[in-house]
Amino acid sequence: MSSQTSLLTPGRLSFLLPDLLERGRDAAVLVAVSHPVPEGRGRRMLVWGDQERGTFQDQAADRQAVELARRGLAGDPAVESGLYTLTMEDGEEMEVFLELHHPRPELVIVGAGHVARPLCTLGHLLGLRVMVLDDRPEFATRERFPEAAELADVDFRRPFQGRTFHPWTHLILVTRGHRFDYECLRKVLSGDSLPGFIGMIGSRRRVRATFQALLEEGIPRDRLARVHSPIGLDLGAETPEEIAVSVAAELVHYWRGGSGRPLREVASVLERFLPEPDPATPPPDDQEPSGRETTDRSSGNPGGSRRHFEEED
């Protein structure tokens, strides 16, 4: 574990944190908001990976702060951004505010064809930083992809050279040919760091051929199992725009969960809450005959006594 025990200044933090996020690293910042000693307020620590910078100038508090930050960065649901109490070596307590920072989620679209254009638009609308990569600079243009944060001319034999993937990267392969998708998928699955989401367009036959070839090349099955392919929810999509919608829908499903079924089927409002009456069951004795007008006693309007309806789950 690497550490640095000198105080972390605001200027140094403002340099380190954006640099870490730009490089795809998760990071946590802890700031002392209360401290037994007045000059202790405002001290800060920065934690990422197996490293940290800064100190609260108390070994016990520093240890608890680092442990808390790493739990939060590891996804512990009990640790979110907020106030926490640390116990110092002498038994005194101090409060810190924990901030968990993650890189901005990004969508890397490999291929600048017909499906990539609407997919870029949808990715942007979903809040992703969109990058479009292709080996044809005349296709990956600002005119065709106005929402893209980055357009790159790449060699599909080395499509990700100089790029770092992280858990917030969503990689979608939609190149113009099977051999390019295969080569790009082989490269990413052979790398040290995998994107959080990997998807590839293609028919079932084409996907099967790709997977078989990659297994024969020695790509581990557990890595291959992470590939969403054929990508997209089953919407019966045919046009490039419809296919892009199905791909974007799978991204939302990946983030949020859910069944992927139509909400009408999930809710079944008519069947669950308004069932068809059984004609064999006689109406209650006090039920008003059909067609008879009643008076709302509270308002004087036709329609019977006022009733309040509450939405049910």
Image (spheres, helix red, strand yellow):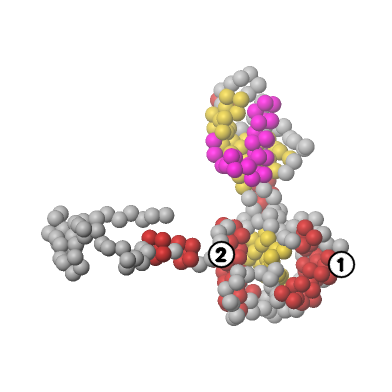
Looking at the image, which is closer to me, 71 or 207?
Answer: 207
**What amino acid is at disc 2?**
Gly
Q: Is residue 160 shown left or right of residue 147?
A: right
* Residue 72 covered by magenta stretch: yes
Q: Residue at x 64, y 45 (%)?
A: 75
Amino acid carrying label 1: it is Glu
Tell me, yes or no, if residue 135 can be seen here.
no
Front residue (pair 127, 223):
223
Rendered image: mark on residue 259: none
Q: Is residue 86 magenta?
A: no
| Residue drawn at the location 61% of the way across and 60% of the way down | 254
Give the crowd class for mark 2: few <14, some 14-19, many >=20 residues within 10 Å.
few
- Asked where in the image residue 286 lies, by quadrant, the reply is bottom left
- SS class of the residue under badge 1? helix
- Where the N terminus falls, by quadrant? top right
Q: Magenta span covers which residues? A: 59-83
Q: Against 178, is 71 above or below? A: above
Which mark is on residue 260?
2
Spatial distance from mark 2 to mark 1, Cα to Cα? 33 Å
Q: Position of residue 260 (x, y in %)?
A: 56, 64
- Residue 206 is situated, as x and y percent measured from the top left of the image, at 75, 76
Q: Image point 59% across, 81% down: which residue? A: 239
Residue 63 visible in this rendered orientation of the protein: yes
Figure quadrant of residue 130: bottom right
Q: Residue 140, position in %: x, y?
A: 68, 75
Which element is circle 2 on? Answer: loop
In what quadrant of the picture does the C terminus appear? Answer: bottom left
Up the image or down, 10 lies above or below 223; here it is: above
The image shows residue 37 at horizontal and vertical percentages of 57, 23
Closer to us: 236 or 191: 236
Residue labelled with disc 1: 216
Residue at point 83% right, 70% down? 213
